[in-house]
Amino acid sequence: MAQSREDIFNDLKDGQLIGPDHHKFQLSGTSVECPLGQLWQAEDVSTKNPINVSLIMLDPFFLQSKSFLAKFKKQIVRSKTINHSHVADIYGYFIHKGGLLFFAFEPVDGLNLEELISNDANKNLNIKQIQGLSTQLTAAINSCTRQWHQALGALDSHFVFVNKKGGVKLLPISMRDFFLENQGMPDSVYDYKRYCAPQALTEDKLDTTADSYTVACATYRLLGGDEFPIQHTQEQRDEVTYSRPASISDEQWDCLQQALSGESSRRYSSAAEFIKAFFPTLSEAQDDSGASAADIEEIDIPVPEKAELPSTAISFKLGKKSINFSVPTFTIPLFIFVVGTGIGFILGVFSSSGSIDAAKATSAKWQQQADTYQQQLTAQAKQLEESQARANNLDIKLNSLQQQVGQSGQPGPKPLSMFRDELDEGQYGPDMVVIAAGEFIMGDANSSGDDNEKPAHKVVFKQNFAISRYEITFAQYDFFVQQTGRRLPDDEGWGRDQQPVINVSWRDARAYTQWLAKETKLPYRLPTEAEWEYSARAGTTTNYWWGDESLAGYAQCSDCGGPLAGKQPLSVGSLKPNPWGLYDFNGNVDEWVIDCYRENYVGARQDGRPYTTSSCQNRAIRGGSWFDINRITRSSSRYRHPPDSKRNTWGFRIALDLTP
């Protein structure tokens, strides 16, 4: 008899492999209950070198709701576009056997805010340490609201982690969005109501004053204030009374009351404005640097690892589970720095029984280390300024993926993850990067291309797909030849192994994908033109992913610079990757795609599917090569060739359909 979802969920254990066939994760340790199900530490074992991740396996109870599933998938897709040091990177969602659903994200290894407060560890924090936590949390929330173009509105303290390194990590999901309209759920999913404005308890549309309330509420709780009940109605939250924390000044008490006002018009316009008003030393530091409240997310507060101290066993209840672990006898230090203020702080998360004198003796040691970290931060800041000056002198338009998305006004999802499939004889298929569904403008939108790149048009991908991280190499193609008895292509004396395969026709490239699909039982194929350009642009709208002008070190072409420019291709991955971690789309070798070539984009499809015709004379080829001038290596540039022809400038990469 097949196991039920509930049995599979309850039987998850240390060392177990989970996930779809093409992407496996290995669970590690024991799970911790969280409002959405089980929080696990795991390894992504589908990559060349396994990497640590955290993941949340959703309770099967939630999978019964189609409304929840739709909202969940939408949130995961939108959240992976966020790139901020205090927001946990989302890698994507995956399906386990029995239809269980989980999502993976950047590993978190510290306490969460709920544990910090419920165990009274916050009582050991001074005002400066609370300042660090609140500032990092504000930076994370601001990053989310800018990316989503809406207020976060509420906060679940179970999903605010204080990592041993890197400080606060906010898991960018909104429990309010999930459950505001859903009644009869477990009480734990409504914990966000403890940290939200009165308006967030209703279906009213929220503005960023709601986030100032949320951060003020978290700060109030860190200062020892009482939590707000989840049973509150809007009217009850409007009239809530709260006592003044003992450790704050009159001015700070006024700020807190203003931020916690039931009337949105009386509150601060954003969480950043509240933080600047509540922590005036932060405001002064920002004013001196010329930064505004909108720039508060730039503040980084690294948290160094604690040194080894004698440990004491600690046990407490979290939900239905007993959590057991060891902590240092005197304290668990977490350092919080505010860049530019020159202050190093020890964040004492726990204080257990032990000698107070001994604890004081260690404090000087931690302060000395804090000074060292501050010196390192100052040196790094100076190096950053020098690098920026050189970039400005060269007028290099190197914007981050997030900046590019902001300029275009379009979503620019990051890749979800990377994997590769096992083949016979201990071999593996190409490294594949999962590309998130989204939309982009295909073709020449900058009036710098040819007629066959016009008209520029919007293409929307409704499903994720995967594309190879590198161009297919000789090593990979030679293994295919060995298995099938086909003819080896000539390498022109430039070497094989990690050199991109050349002298292959469109039919050769397609034969490779058909063989790989048969070996793996997965739908490998050549990418469509739209998939290729979407991946090459990686969320950008410029001629190349790095800007509008050709730059040395970014592509291999005849006039791109470098000792081998115009002479031969480079080994795959020799140059810089684009913002999605993909290599060599611009130059090196032209890449076959599956589409039949068409003269222009008049009437072109908008769903990303390939253009086909019963009498296809030429296949499209993209990217330009080592032999071409830089203009031919633009992201929108395209050419055509007969499917049986081959040259030493032509190669290919592959794609894979992914089931939702």
Image: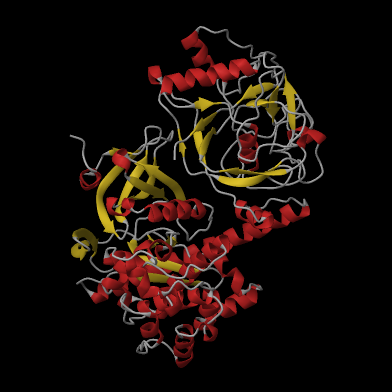
Residue 190, quarter of the rendered image: bottom left
Q: Nearer the viewer, residue 387 or 577?
A: 577
Q: Is residue 61 left or right of residue 403?
A: left
Q: Position of residue 387 (x, y in %)?
A: 67, 54
Q: Position of residue 555 (x, y in %)?
A: 70, 35
Q: Position of residue 102 (x, y in %)?
A: 36, 47
Residue 586, quarter of the rendered image: top right
Q: Is residue 459 left or right of residue 312?
A: right
Q: Is residue 476 visible?
A: no
Q: Residue furthest bottom?
A: 250
Identify the residue shown where x is 65% and y is 32%.
529
Q: Position of residue 229 (x, y in %)?
A: 31, 78
Identify the residue shown where x is 60% and y is 52%.
411
| Quadrant containing the N terminus in the rendered view | top left
Identify the residue shown where x is 39% and y is 17%.
425
Q: Is residue 616 left or right of residue 436?
A: right
**With respect to residue 332, does 261 lie above or below?**
below
